[in-house]
Structure formats: structure tokens, C-alpha cells
Amino acid sequence: MAQQHVLITGGAGFVGSHLAERLLDRGSAVTILDDLSTGNYANIAHLEGHENVRLLIDTVFNEHLMEDLIRSHDRVFHLASAVGVKLIIEQPVKTIQTIVGGTEIVLRYCSRYRKPVLITSTSEVYGKGTHIPFREDDDVVTGPTSRHRWAYACSKALDEFLALAHWRETRLPVAIVRMFNTVGPRQTGKYGMVVPRFVQAALRNEPIEIHGDGRQSRCFAHVSDVTAALVTILDTPACFGKVINVGSDEEVTIRDLAERVVEITGSRSELRFVPYSDVYGDGFEDMQRRVPCIERLQELTGHRMTRSLDTIIRDVAESCRHRT
């Protein structure tokens, strides 16, 4: 079997770097493209010099480069994106331009050269939905355009519309993944990611800052389980033209998460509750629950998440200890 050449946009990011490792482990040649705006060279430094790795510090908006790369690769994982609610609130113009414009370029050239492509979307698309668990065909409700938080959800939804339009018109082999909270080694709290932020505070015995009252709940999947799902999805033709939730369905409140982090790390940290307005400004809206239905993923691919939340916390803590 000929070696596959795989392009990962956003490959120096947290998820992208783990995806690159997984693809290398199965014998693929991997090109990592990242402008390091939210990615981090440290995530992939250990891969530079690998005989099957090519690292390019550039942007998906370099259209001549993107055309050459997509034409010369067998498949594409498009992970390049603005990430984190905090960044979205602070830089809404960059968020919209990066998400919509970058995906349009990737899809255009994948369509031209008939390359299978996986587009990463987000659970944010479900907006204010209250029907739990979230199913891929549920109606979605978002807030007004005056609330910047919703720019991310709407931009990602437009990505999905565009990808599905390519599938309907030309049968481009494209799969769309709505990713729920993904956690694991190498993730930082820089863009507001809650688990590494809690773990880092706990290891320093500093107060753990909880936004709101802590009763909001989320589900957290280990990055190793998630990257395995991404690879399997693009390997499965039955996934083309579909939106697929990828995440864990183990639900936990943010307060309970903080308490588990304190217990597992043996920390002396106290919990501190901070109003959303102090963190994000007036008018911020959060969702009370976010739980995926993962039946479609299981039915199409047989893939299941295998790592518990306690395992995730331990792995993140170990990773944080090594970085300090």
C-alpha cells in the first residue's frame, strides 16, 4: 500500500499536533501548516526533523501555497481556526475572517483536485439549544448579532453550509465534525480552556476561578480518543456529506470539575466564583448544558471514547508538571 501524504492545517495547535502524531504512527507522511497565531511551535518541535514530517510556517490565506499543497496531498484535515471564547470576544473580526475565509479556500481547492477533507466545526453551533443530548439534525438557536460571542457559532455554521454545498453539488468527499470539549496533554489555559486552567491553578495551590455559579455542565473528551475519531471518520466513506458529533457524553458541572481537580492533584486551592461580566464584559451569554449525542459516530465508525474524566485530569496534570 502506497504511503499516504496528509495535510493538516492548524497542525501546531493542541489537537493538530496530536493528530500529526497519530497519522505518523500509522505510516503517513504529514505536512503541518500553521501560522502560529494560536498554535505553538513547542507542540510540534519534537516532530521537526522526522523523515515523514514537513513543517510550514504559513497561512491558509496563501492561496498559491494552498493550491500546491492540496494538489500534492492525498487528504486534508482542516483544523486551522480561531479558538476559545476569550479570543472570540476580544478579536471578533479576526475570528470571522479566519474561520469563513480559510475554510472557503480549503474547500475550493479540495473540490478542484477531488481530495477528501475533514472540516472541524464546534458544539458552539448548537447555540442556545436546550434539547439534551444535542443531535446533529437539531434546530439551532443563537443570540443576536450584537453579542460577539455568537460570531464564532455562526461562522462555523457557515463553514458547515459551504462544505455540505460542495458535497451536494459535486460529491466532494467531505466530512464535518462538531467537536465538543477536547482536553489532554499540551493544552494550555491561554484561550480560556477550563481544564488546564483549573489544573494549573491547583498545582500552584492558587484559587481556582469559576465563571458564573459553576452549575453549568460540560463533557470532556481525551484528545487521544478525539484524534482517533477524526482519522476513522475520514477513512469512512459513509461519513462524507454528514455532520458528526465528536466528544464524550460524561457530563460534569464546572463546580464538580473544579472539586475533582483539587482532589486528584492533592491541591490546597479554594474555589472562587467570578461573575461573567468581570471576565467577558456585559451581555455575555453562556449555555447551561452541552452534551453530545454520539450515536451517529458510533453507528458510522464503531468508534467509542475510552478515557474517563479522571484520566484526563491526571494526564493534564502530568503534562503541566513537565512544562514547569
Image (cartoon, rainbow, N blue to C red):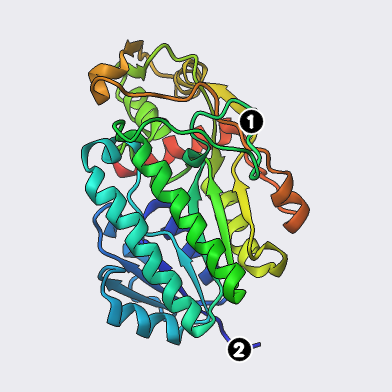
Residue 150 % position (x, y): 37, 37
**Depth check, front residue: 156 or 265:** 156
**Depth check, front residue: 41 or 247:** 247
- The amino acid pointed to by label 1 is Glu
Residue 255 % position (x, y): 47, 15
Q: Is residue 318 above or below residue 288?
A: below
Q: Is residue 168 above or below residue 228?
A: below
Residue 135 found in image quarter: top right
Mark 1 falls on what kind of element? loop
Residue 298 % position (x, y): 74, 50
**Depth check, front residue: 189 or 49:** 189
The quadrant in which the C terminus is found is top left
- The amino acid pointed to by label 2 is Ala
Residue 239 found in image quarter: bottom right
The quadrant in which the N terminus is found is bottom right
Mark 2 vs mark 1: which is more N-terminal?
2
At 23% from the left and 22% from the top, the residue drawn is 281
Label of residue 164 in the image: none
Residue indicated by mark 2: 2
Task: Work out whether residue 321 can be spotted.
Answer: no
Label of residue 250 in the image: 1
Q: Is residue 71 above or below residue 310?
A: below
At 37% from the left and 13% from the top, the residue drawn is 268
